[in-house]
């Protein structure tokens, strides 16, 4: 039996070490081919994976063939997207290996390729997630003079016809907004520019996803300064990342709009702590989940109380204006997201096992707390094994453990990755928060784990829309989403534990100040 296992592992090692796994031309070809296949499916128009956007009154994107020309069957479009995602992920892995073995491309051209794929993806209909329709609906409510934090789209379109709200899809039609004031402002602007047309409103929302996505990639390259290898990693992990082009742009999610302000904050960390605080404060007015970046930046300044104070003051200004003066109820709205368990995460298997014994609500509560405990454990493990490498921009002899930007970038990668892999509710577009800082760090196993995790979550949500698939398709999708994807997320946790264990399985120790206090107490004379 051991020889059989050794034979399998030996074959796997030889396959990974084969020359084709470092062929950057093959890797780029797979990324482009996967993106082209996604574009082709979307350009064919509304289907079980591409959204219906209502009438087109002009020439604005998203562009697609008329419905009367071609309608793809689910057994064509769904497997095509699965194949495209696998090709893109494998291509990204090959390019990652090529970088590690010495590939040094022209980064301007590489960025241009990623920008082109990103732009094209944003000119065709969004796919597999109807979240962008809900963004449009919340914006439409504001244009009508209604409060999206109190009123749901369904409350309106069930009583009267509305040309935008009528095109929303389940399951969130009865859910009020959970987004911050700045996100609501962008939704209002898109709805105002859309002028009562869902198709045009979605176009502007796609632009509000695309432009921040490109800015994030550009800022990551600037943060890499003149380090060619780190620049290439920054491009590959942002604008050329097929998993993020798919998850963020093909779904027109607002993750990039959220993150761009936090990356601006990182960009200013070596220049102005106050402006860095303004950046992370603005990020918090879009989504409160960016608190992890705020913690990371504060940790970077922890040895300099003046800079820490400037950071806190800068962050407090936009947060106080947004949540204190403009939209106080938005802060409470974010709490509505708690308690959810997403298909494809590590939690469904445990939920299925415990619910018959303890009931639904106690099981959800236990899984929620288990997720937080797991996150703390994984944070510790990753903090022990993630390599230290100075973020470019200061002399190489500088100690990375003393550089605020390096500390913040490394801490942001650790905190967000730990949250992503342990949260019971996790989706592939959330991964952008980890990919950006990860691109500025040294090579690590976390790179591959994020590719693995993102691929399976992306595959799982190809059939994520609440539309009626056939029973055979539902069965195949359930195997991928509820079985294979959940198992893949559990393997990520197992791999992190194994990584920590093989690197010395260091356990937490008492803080230095507590050890010194106890030593003084033990050495004090009796009586």
Image (spheres, helix red, strand yellow):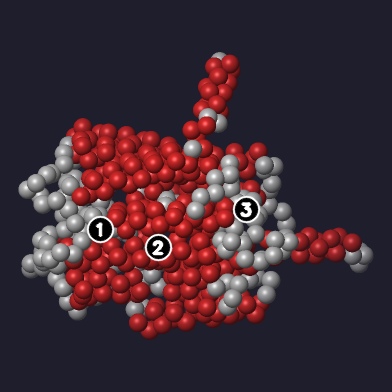
Say above or below: 124 vs 33.
below
* Distance between the alpha carbons at the discs numbered 1 and 3: 40 Å
226 left or right, relative to 148: right
Residue 475: quarter of image: top left
Residue positioned 81% across, 63% down in the render: 516
Question: Which image quarter is the C terminus in?
Answer: bottom right
**Dot 3 lies on which element?**
helix
Would residue 44 be visible to someone looking at this image? Answer: yes
In-front residue for pair 295/447: 447
* Residue indicated by mark 3: 383
Mark 2 or mark 3: name the one nearer the start of the chain: 2
Other-residue count near label 1 (Cα within 10 Å), few / some / many at <14 / 14–19 / ≥20: many
Q: Residue 318: percent from the left, percent from the top?
A: 44, 79
Residue 200: quarter of image: bottom left
* Distance between the alpha carbons at the discs numbered 2 and 1: 15 Å
Mark 2 or mark 1: name the one nearer the start of the chain: 1
* Residue indicated by mark 1: 123
In-front residue for pair 465/205: 205
In-front residue for pair 509/130: 130
* Residue indicated by mark 2: 214
Q: Residue 375: percent from the left, percent from the top?
A: 53, 52
In-front residue for pair 294/158: 294
Q: Are marks 2 and 1 in contact (CB under 8 Å)?
A: no
């Amino acid at each position: 039996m051991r020889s059989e296992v050794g034979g399998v592992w030996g074959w796997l090692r030889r396959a990974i070490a084969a020359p084709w796994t470092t062929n950057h031309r093959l890797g780029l070809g797979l990324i482009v081919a996967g993106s082209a296949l996604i574009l082709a499916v979307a350009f064919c128009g509304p289907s079980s994976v591409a959204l219906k956007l209502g009438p087109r009154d002009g020439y604005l994107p998203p562009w697609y063939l008329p419905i009367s020309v071609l309608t793809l069957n689910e057994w064509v479009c769904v497997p095509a997207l699965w194949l495209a995602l696998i090709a893109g992920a494998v291509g990204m892995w090959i390019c990652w290996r090529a970088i590690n073995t010495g590939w040094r491309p022209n980064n301007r051209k590489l960025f241009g390729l990623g920008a082109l794929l990103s732009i094209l993806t944003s000119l065709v209909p969004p796919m597999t997630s109807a979240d962008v329709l809900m963004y449009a609906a919340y914006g439409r409510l504001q244009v009508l003079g209604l409060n999206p934090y109190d009123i749901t789209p369904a409350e309106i379109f069930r009583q009267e016809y509305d040309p935008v709200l009528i095109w929303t899809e389940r399951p969130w039609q009865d859910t009020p907004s959970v987004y911050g004031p700045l996100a609501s402002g962008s939704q209002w602007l898109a709805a105002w520019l859309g002028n009562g047309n869902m198709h045009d409103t979605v176009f502007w929302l796609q632009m509000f996803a695309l432009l921040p996505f490109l800015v994030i990639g550009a800022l990551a390259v600037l943060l890499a300064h003149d380090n060619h290898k780190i620049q290439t990693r920054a491009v590959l992990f942002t604008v050329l990342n097929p998993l993020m082009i798919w998850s963020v742009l093909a779904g027109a999610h607002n993750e990039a709009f959220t993150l761009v302000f936090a990356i601006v904050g990182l960009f200013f960390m070596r220049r102005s702590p106050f402006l860095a605080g303004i950046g992370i404060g603005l990020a918090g007015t879009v989504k409160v989940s960016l608190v992890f970046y705020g913690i990371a930046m504060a940790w970077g300044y922890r040895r300099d109380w003046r800079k820490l104070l400037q950071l806190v003051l800068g962050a407090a200004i936009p947060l106080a204006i947004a949540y204190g003066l403009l939209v106080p109820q938005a802060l409470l709205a974010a709490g509505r997201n708690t308690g959810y368990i997403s298909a494809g995460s590590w939690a469904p298997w445990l939920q299925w096992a415990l619910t018959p014994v303890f009931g639904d609500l106690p099981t959800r509560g236990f899984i929620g707390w288990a997720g937080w405990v797991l996150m703390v454990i994984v944070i510790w493990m990753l903090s022990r094994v993630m390599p230290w490498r100075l973020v470019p921009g200061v002399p190489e002899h500088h100690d990375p453990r003393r550089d605020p930007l390096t500390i913040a970038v490394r801490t942001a990668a650790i905190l967000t990755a730990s949250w992503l892999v342990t949260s019971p509710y996790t989706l592939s577009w959330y991964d952008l928060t980890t990919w950006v800082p990860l691109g500025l760090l040294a090579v690590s196993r976390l790179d591959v784990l994020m590719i693995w995790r993102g691929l399976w979550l992306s595959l799982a949500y190809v059939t994520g829309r609440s539309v009626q698939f056939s029973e055979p398709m539902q069965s195949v999708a359930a195997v991928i989403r509820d079985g294979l994807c959940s198992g893949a997320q559990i393997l990520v946790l197992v791999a992190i534990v194994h990584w920590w264990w093989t690197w010395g399985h260091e356990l937490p120790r008492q803080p230095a100040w507590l050890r010194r206090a106890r030593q003084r107490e033990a050495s004090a004379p009796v009586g």
